[in-house]
Image (cartoon, rainbow, N blue to C red):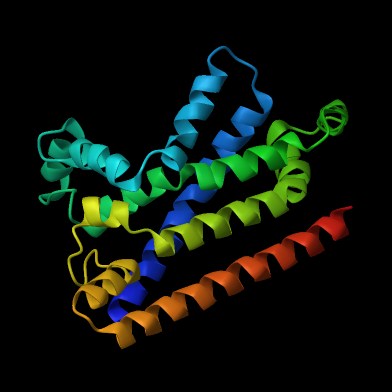
Amino acid sequence: MDWVALRLSLELAGLTVLLLLPIGIALGRFLAYRAMRGKEILEALVALPLVLPPTVFGYYLLVAFGAASPLGRAWQALFDRPLVFTFEGLLLASVIFNLPFAVQPMQRAFEAIAPDLRAAAACCGMSPWRVLLRIELPLAWPGILTALVLAFAHTLGEFGIVLMVGGAIPGETETIAIAIYDRVQAFDDRAAAQMAMFLLVFSLATIAVTFFASRRVGRRLG
């Protein structure tokens, strides 16, 4: 087992979920409640990572983060290091690539809340922030939890984006998915099988626990 790669993968997945939590809630709620022209285009942009091959999406992120891009130059000027082939660049790419896994379940969860319930809360004098914290978030929590676990599990197994943007640098951007690939390339089938089995069991257990928790929360709220 490559413990360094596993630790890096867990750190990347955890930070990705942490950053996606407020982004997913804000964007998912916006898409659920706001009627506007061009909404379908915005939803399509959010869902784009689902249909584009990871290597294609990773290529465009590599260009966007590169030293010739405005973002790459600004990052270099601020931190005196490039954005590509670093953990920070990999984290930013992971957040962007996992956006639909976080936003879409949260959007559906907010859409399932009855509009009359929100209107009644507003008529009772509750502020928008209080409605969000006391009514919307508790009711949408199963969807939010599902979104976060999907993003976490997807980040653990992501290969194409990590390879394109991270460069598979040991101890810096080499995740467990890359480590498995490297072991296969080196004909170390035992180590590859061990890490693959760990990733399979861990991902399956995480998703199963999440579905169980979501159903319990749903029954309690119902």
Left or right: 199 as drawn, with respect to 131:
left
Residue 76, image quadrant: top left
Residue 220, image quadrant: bottom right
User: Residue 58, position in %: x, y?
Assistant: 28, 44
Left or right: 70 as drawn, with respect to 143:
left
Instruction: Inspect this view and state whether residue 61 appears.
Output: yes
Residue for point 53% across, 77% down: 201
User: Residue 90, position in %: x, y?
Assistant: 28, 54
Residue for point 24% across, 63% down: 173
Q: Nearer the viewer, residue 12 or 129?
A: 12
Q: How many marks?
A: 0
Left or right: 46 as drawn, with respect to 220:
left
Instruction: Inspect this view and state whether residue 22 appears.
Output: no
Left or right: 151 as drawn, with respect to 136:
left
Q: Nearer the viewer, residue 163 or 17?
A: 163
| Quadrant location of the N terminus in the rendered image | bottom left
Above or below, 5 relative to 102: below
Residue for point 23% across, 41% down: 59
User: Residue 33, position in %: x, y?
Assistant: 68, 26
Residue for point 37% across, 51% down: 94
Residue 209, image quadrant: bottom right
Above or below, 202 relative to 47: below
Above or below, 173 relative to 23: below
Going by the picture, which residue comes out furthest to the top? 37
User: Residue 155, position in %: x, y?
Assistant: 42, 59
